Amino acid sequence: MRRKQIVAMAWENMKLRRLRTSLTTLSVVIGITAIIALASLGEGFRVTVTQRMEEGFELNVLTVIPGSLFAGLSRERFRDYQVQNITKIDGVEVATQVMQIGNVTLYNGEKKVKAFVATAVNFTDFIKVFPDRFSFDAGGPPAQGRNDTIVIGYKVNYPNETETAFAKAGDNVTMSLSKTEQILTPPFLRYVMENHTFNVAGTLQKKGTPGLTNFDYWIFIPLETARNIYNTEESDLIFVRVSNPDYSERIADSIEDLFPPFRISILVPLTFIRQVDYIIGLVQLFLTSIASISLLVAGIGIMNIMTVSVMERTREIGIMKAIGAKNLTILTMFLTEATLIGILGGLIGVPTGYGLSYLLSFIVSRFIGGQQQDSVFQAPETQRAMVYPIFSLWWAVGAILFGIIVCVLFGLYPARKAAKLDPVKALRYE
Amino acid sequence: MTAVLETRNVKRAYQMGKVTVSALRGVSLKVEESEFVAILGPSGSGKSTLLHVLGGLDRPDEGDLLIDGISLYALNENKLADVRLHKIGFVFQFFNLLPRLTALRNVELPLTLADVPEQESIKKAKEMLELVGLGDRITHRPTELSGGEQQRVAMARALINDPKIVLADEPTGNLDTTTGGEIVRLMQRLNEEKGQTFVVVTHDPSVAENADRILFLKDGLIQGEKKGVGGAYH
């Protein structure tokens, strides 16, 4: 039979039973809407989270930390030759070690500020590792060879967002730090406080990025100075910058090979992000599957209504068969109606779904925004959590196709029933 | 003359609840090309069953059936549908037009099924409606047509694929005498002008007597035959 005529007849039939067609289509629309809304919100959520993580992590930077989650934290310390070995690995641009000094207080005349941690770094290499993050508000990196300089992070310089800065570039500040001192013989140790004076070489700009390496809360002193104070050749962490994040996992393996087993751990941002991405992907799939159930329910509705329709049109089917319609033609006629409902449902459902997802994202972001206001984790400078739904052509096409497939699958039974009707009986049917 | 339709000892029985009803008990008949044959019988004689079997809508339990030399008994459902489409035209007592299609679309339907291009099929359907005298009614739907007009549309539909044989089941049964007479005359005219073969099943002797040949069907058997007035033409 001519395809155009089949479609025309199917359309006529649908128009004739307008209410029935509308309601059946509505059920498909609801199913597609649910799928699209959840999928696009999920996609938006995934992208937002991934973006935030990429902001928070430097994808190019691997962090080597002592100890291992499998074998317990060791007191592994790093030495210069290990850093040099890491630098030799193919794909490593630069590796630099840092020392972290806890419990530090800074004094500038009357002003006093407590920093969580002072980080002792080799400024030249450290800036090479974090070129984008280490940007100065005033001043600059310490001059080569000066060992009495300090660089102060934004939040240390402006604690509680106060107007006045703790220190300006060029100020002399006093750092009070604690160190342990041997008394008599081991294991007798005591804590002593020591004061050291530093010249402020520069203050850092506000970054406000989330993540491990938000330097807003950090202060930096030269590594050599810290080593002198603590009389050590060792360090706590190694930052490794790789030329391409794609190599980071291979390079991490090479770094691990340089150390005895389970003595170090390496934080590979890419792996982490990939894991999170994978998990969110699973959640997204799960939500979409739940939404798909509503489409299946719509499918049952289609099956139900088409069965009724076949009964009502028994005589018509008999006539068609008597004048020479093949079973396949009858089957096609009914499946065409199911397909049209699927297409119609998809075409309406996809935009409705995106509309709904924008509405949901608006409501959710307001809700979360309000909730997080007083939270410890919500730094005031980070922007409100906002998840924008993402339009994906593939999701749209997929949802429409899925809708059509469901309609056709559930329409298959009644359509087959129609096709198999005995023409003689169908003609007698009143 | 060659036989366009031939049955050999066709039997057909139905299961009505627990009772088996033998509708056809061995029907053998031959219809020649361009012949107008009436099958006359009272209700319950097996007329409709015979017509359904002749038209390939129903399969006989036994016996063979040849249409234009093709044995229908051996055909699968698709081939049978093709035979109905190309070799046979049906006219029913209750017209059996598709209610939502216009007269033109109803007539065109068999061409649509045969995948004839739209332009050509519409042209042909118009011609056919002209032929049955409904050239001015082509856009009407069946509900907007009188019984006689509907039966003419049905006739046009039966003829559109240029079938070997037109099978009519009580074509006047649902019409008043005047309109019924017109339909019979239309069939006669088509038979005479186009040489169209007709097999008309009826219980009405006044319809049957217009045929070339009348076969009497009773209790599922052909009980005899005689020449009708239409026979004078041949």
Image (cartoon, coloured by chain):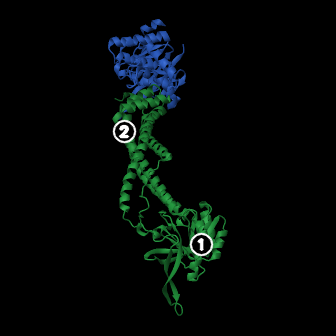
Q: Residue at x 36, y 13 (%)?
A: B180
Mark 1 crowdedness (10 Å alpha carbons): few <14, some 14-19, many ≥20: some
Estimate the x, y position of residue A190 in percent, counting from the top left.
Answer: 49, 88
**Rendered position, A369 above or below B66:** below
Q: Secondary structure at mark 2?
A: helix
Most distant residue in the bottom direction: A184
Q: Which residue is mark 1?
A: A122
* Chain of the residue displaying label 1: A
Whether residue B208 can be seen here? no
- The foreground one among A18 and A313 is A18
Q: Which residue is mark 2?
A: A305
The colour of chain A is green
- The foreground one among A226 and A175 is A175
* Chain of the residue displaying label 2: A
The colour of chain B is blue
Say which of marks 1 and 2 sits in front.
Answer: 1
Report whether A123 appears left or right of A8.
Answer: right
The kind of residue on which mark 2 rests is Ile
Mark closer to the chain start, 1 or 2:
1
The kind of residue on which mark 1 rests is Asn
Residue A71 found in image quarter: bottom right
